[in-house]
Image: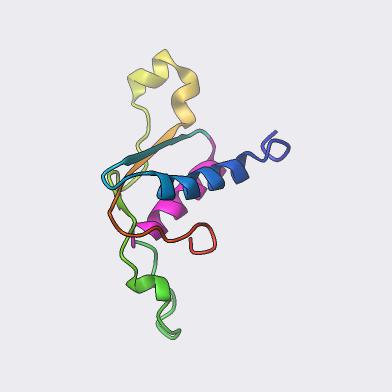
């Protein structure tokens, strides 16, 4: 189903669009229900908030290392449902929520940069 509907591709395109469409101060909140989805969101937000790893100390610095972040993380880690919520709604047990605030920096320009 995920592959047939290109759900992961749709998620990537939606994240890229959010960077261009959100005004400074706008919030991006994503709830994922699958680890593949969560991984895409995590990597996207980490990169565009300037918190991605520095890479190898033996390699030249990436041009992205000097760019101002286009997002500021609101939640450092994914938020998971509490026990009472999963008791009331067992399907929520796999959900993960990540949130970030759009800064006034210029967009990084999509997946090729992220």
Please say if 64 is above or below 10: below
Q: Which residues are magenta?
A: 34-50
The quadrant holding residue 2 is: top right
Where does the image place residue 11, in percent across and percent down from the top left? 55, 42
Question: How many numbered marks appear?
Answer: 0
Seen at 49% across and 64% down, the residue is 113
Residue 23 x/y as whole percent: 32, 45
Q: Residue at x 42, y 61 (%)?
A: 108
57 or 16, which lies in front?
A: 16
Could you say where residue 101 lies in the image, as x and y percent from the top left? 29, 45
* Colour treatment of the image: rainbow
Residue 48, located in which quarter of the rendered image? bottom left
Q: Work out whether residue 89 or residue 14 is closer to the camera in this orientation and state it.
A: 14
What residue is drawn where x is 40% and y is 82%? 57
- Going by the picture, which residue comes out furthest to the right? 4
Residue in front for this viewpoint, 6 or 16: 16
Where in the figure is residue 111, as x and y percent of width and height? 53, 58
Residue that appears at 26% across and 44% down: 25
Query: Quadrant where the N terminus lies?
Result: top right
75 shown above or below 85: below
Main SS, magenta region, reads helix
Q: Would you place residue 114 above or below residue 41 in this image? A: below
Magenta stretch contains residue 109: no
């Amino acid at each position: 189903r995920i592959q047939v509907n290109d759900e992961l591709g749709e998620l990537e395109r939606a994240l890229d669009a959010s960077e261009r469409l959100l005004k400074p101060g706008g919030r991006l909140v994503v709830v994922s229900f699958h680890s593949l989805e969560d991984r895409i969101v995590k990597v996207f937000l980490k990169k565009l908030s300037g918190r991605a790893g520095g890479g190898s100390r033996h390699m030249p610095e990436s041009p992205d290392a000097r760019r101002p972040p286009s997002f500021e993380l609101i939640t450092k880690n994914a938020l998971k449902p509490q026990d009472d919520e999963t008791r009331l709604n067992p399907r929520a047990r796999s959900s993960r929520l990540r949130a970030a605030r759009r800064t006034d920096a210029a967009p990084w320009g999509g997946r090729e940069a992220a």
